[in-house]
Amino acid sequence: MARNPASAALGGMVALAVAIGIGRFVYTPILPPMQAALGLNAFAAGLIASANFAGYLVGALAAALPLPGSRRAWLAGGLASSTLTTGAMGLVRGVPAFLALRFAGGAASAFGLVFASAIVLERLAESGRLGLSSVLFAGVGTGIALSALLVSAMRWAGFGWSGLWIASGLLSAAGTLAAAALIAPEEWREAYDAPLRAARISAALLRLIAAYGLFGFGYVITATFLVAIVRATTGLRPLEPVIWVVFGLAAAPSVLLWSRIARRIGLGRAFALAAVVEALGVLASVGLAGAGEIFLSAVLVGSTFMGLTALGLMGGRTLARGDARPVLALMTGAFGLGQIIGPSFAGALYDRLGSFAVPSLAAAAALVTAALLAAA
């Protein structure tokens, strides 16, 4: 198969749909029926989410190491592991098993993101087609939307939470096969540990890494508990099957939007603007708690979190001025650390205060701080 940049971008899109869109985010629409069936409180739900993010952090740091073998093996292994750990969630019971599977799934997600981004962004840069990066990063929103539709349809048909996990694993398996077919063998074969010029860590890059970590904390509370907020709010429960679909649909074209904004005003300013918009979305989720505010939150957070992800990784690749892989992994690790803290922090405060308002205010403050760092 020819080294086709469009095919590589599409294959990367499918890979991110599997690793992140499904592997990370399908937990959000499945969480309410899990809580209802198993009696999970908000702290336990947040702890399970944090285990996923802890695995994500470990996976990101591991991906920065000079691992032997081909990039094909590591990316394929990450996607396969994400598939297996997603499906297996429907086969176990009990918080310890959930923690172990979500930890392993988080590590797999990080490998999928780092390797897919490194392979595809390098290929697009070589071919002068970096504009196709919006296709690559649209994978997360696409995976969210497809898995949300699957979960909503199956819940309407009467399936329980365990069936939702198993079906999501099957969807991931199909995506893994599609990614392998779309990314040409030549793209996969290059040795992962080939010698490259070492990256340089500048002050600007350190600020971006810190901003990226704050973004991880700032978005994750809403992204984890939005559907639970809808279920817990009188009058909003009919929106539960559709709100996560709206979130995913808003995410799918967002990278293209923010990439165009970045070309006009620069990566740093675009990142800062997106972080402020996302802060408004986080606040909307716990504002007046009407249907309009919830939809606004889904649209604003959905349409910015992948834009911020893409802008951050593209900015890191530019500032690295050398082998981008360790920098991408370091940024993914900072992001993962923010994600680890967010859900447990929010869940513990919810169990104590009966509201996500205080953790959401903290999340919005973190996003504003990230904007200031990125714009500096």
Image: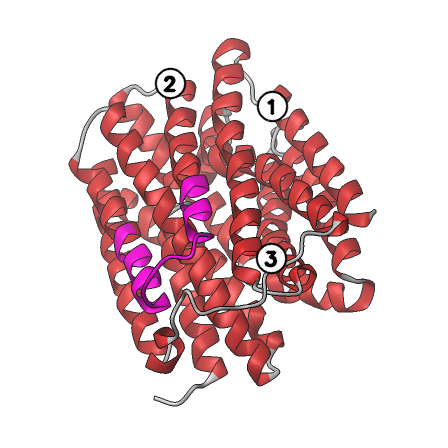
Q: Position of residue 352 (x, y in %)?
A: 51, 9
**Vertically, is 235 above or below 62?**
above
Label 1–label 2 contact, CB within 8 A: no
Compared across the picture, whether 51 is left or right of 337 comes to left
**For mark 3, does the 10 Å Cα neighbourhood hold few (<14), some (14 to 19), or many (20 or more) residues?**
many
Main secondary-structure element of the magenta-colored stretch: helix
Q: Amino acid at mark 1?
A: Pro
Q: Position of residue 293 (x, y in %)?
A: 64, 37
> Is residue 159 visible to us here?
no
**For mark 1, does the 10 Å Cα neighbourhood hold few (<14), some (14 to 19), or many (20 or more) residues?**
many
Q: Position of residue 203 (x, y in %)?
A: 76, 48
Q: In whole angstroms, how far apart are the C-alphas of marks 3 and 1?
A: 26 Å
Which residues are the magenta region?
56-81
Label 2–label 3 contact, CB within 8 A: no
Mark closer to the chain start, 2 or 3: 2
Mark 2 or 3: in front is: 3
> What label does residue 313 carry, if any?
3
Q: Which residue extends farthest top?
A: 352
Q: In whole angstroms, how far apart are the C-alphas of marks 2 and 3?
A: 35 Å
